[in-house]
Image: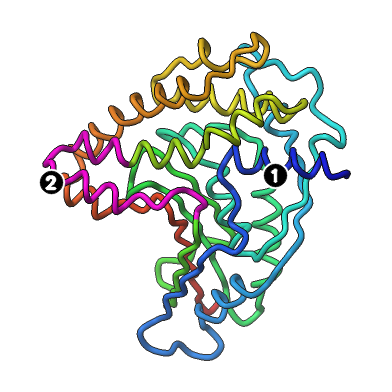
Amino acid sequence: MDVTDRGVSSVLDATLFALFVGGAIVTLTLPAAPAPDEDRADAVADTLVATTADVEYTLAPGARRANEARVVFPWTTGPAFERTAHGTLAEHLATATVGSVAVDGQQVGHTYDDLAARAVAETRNATRNRHQRVAVRAVWEPYPEAPLRGAATAGPTPPPTADIHAARLTVDSGMPATRANALAAAESGSYDAVAAAVADGVVRGFFPPNATRHALLADYPVNRLVDYRYRRFGSLVGADLSSNVSVADNERNVTGANAQLRAALTERLAADMRDRFETPRAAARAVRVGDVRITVRTWSP
């Protein structure tokens, strides 16, 4: 892969999902009391933070599983779809989690399905232990139980009778830190203002204007994968972006498209916040756009 290819790959990764989690801040929360040596979730969490892996994957599922009524993909295999991700297991899980984001349970796209599967496999291999069972779950959501959510899971579900030990990691999602803006907005006493702050962070995170413009001008398949991601996201939050974004029609109005997304997402989140939180300030305190939460659970077989 030459320098140009690497540049396009970076733009794709940054634009589709704000996935630059390399060098991410990782916070480890240990159990309050030491767990038995043979069953320590904190040791597994340390492994996720310390173990690095190069994960080779393909973007092809994003093209193969796209609805061609929205964006046409002339071919869906070949070197242009191949990528390699470098990072710790925690970072790979964070990437997979943000890449799998869904709106009301409907996944936005499948471009990172292969990366997610390989990140989960790497995690299972690194945490396998015949003396204990391990379950790892990574979750991104702008606030708990929000209509937008991404998740990745490695390992089995613990049985209800198991003695569970847990540890938690917080990994930078690559999205803008939004809580301070949400708290400032809450001073107005308006759910709409808090929702607007969250929507702005989410839209800037998934579709940063400059990188998105470059990606829409890039070669195939980058341009069409971004086009599809953009318009699919819009359709799921109630915004038709086709007049602003369409590679086939040479439409690349990122400013207009992002404004549409912010407005539609603000309305969707404000309605959800009113149902979920007693006050706008309570909603703002729950905001965590910038974080992926990883929970490790271990138990004896």
In this picture, is 199 found above or below 88? above
- Residue located 71% across and 34% down the image: 61
Which residue in the protein does label 2 denote? 279
In this picture, is 3 found above or below 270? below
Please tell me whether residue 260 belongs to the stretch shown in magenta. no
Q: Position of residue 111 (x, y in %)?
A: 66, 36
- Mark 2 residue crowding within 10 angstroms, few (<14) / some (14–19) / many (20+): some
- Residue located 21% across and 33% down the image: 192
Q: Please tell me whether the stretch drawn in magenta is mainly helix, strand or loop.
A: helix
Q: Count the marks.
A: 2
Specify which label sits upstream in the sequence, 2 or 1: 1
Please tell me whether residue 183 belongs to the stretch shown in magenta. yes
Question: In the image, which disc is placed on residue 116?
Answer: none
- Mark 1 residue crowding within 10 angstroms, few (<14) / some (14–19) / many (20+): some
**Which span is picked out in magenta?**
173-197
- Residue located 76% across and 41% down the image: 58
Could you tell me how far apart the alpha carbons at marks 2 and 1 are, in whole angstroms? 40 Å
Question: In the image, which disc is placed on residue 10?
Answer: 1
Query: Is 92 displayed left or right of 244 in the figure?
Result: right
User: Considering the image in quadrants, where does the N terminus appear?
Assistant: top right
Give the SS element for disc 1.
Answer: helix
Q: Position of residue 68 (x, y in %)?
A: 66, 15
Q: Residue furthest front?
A: 210
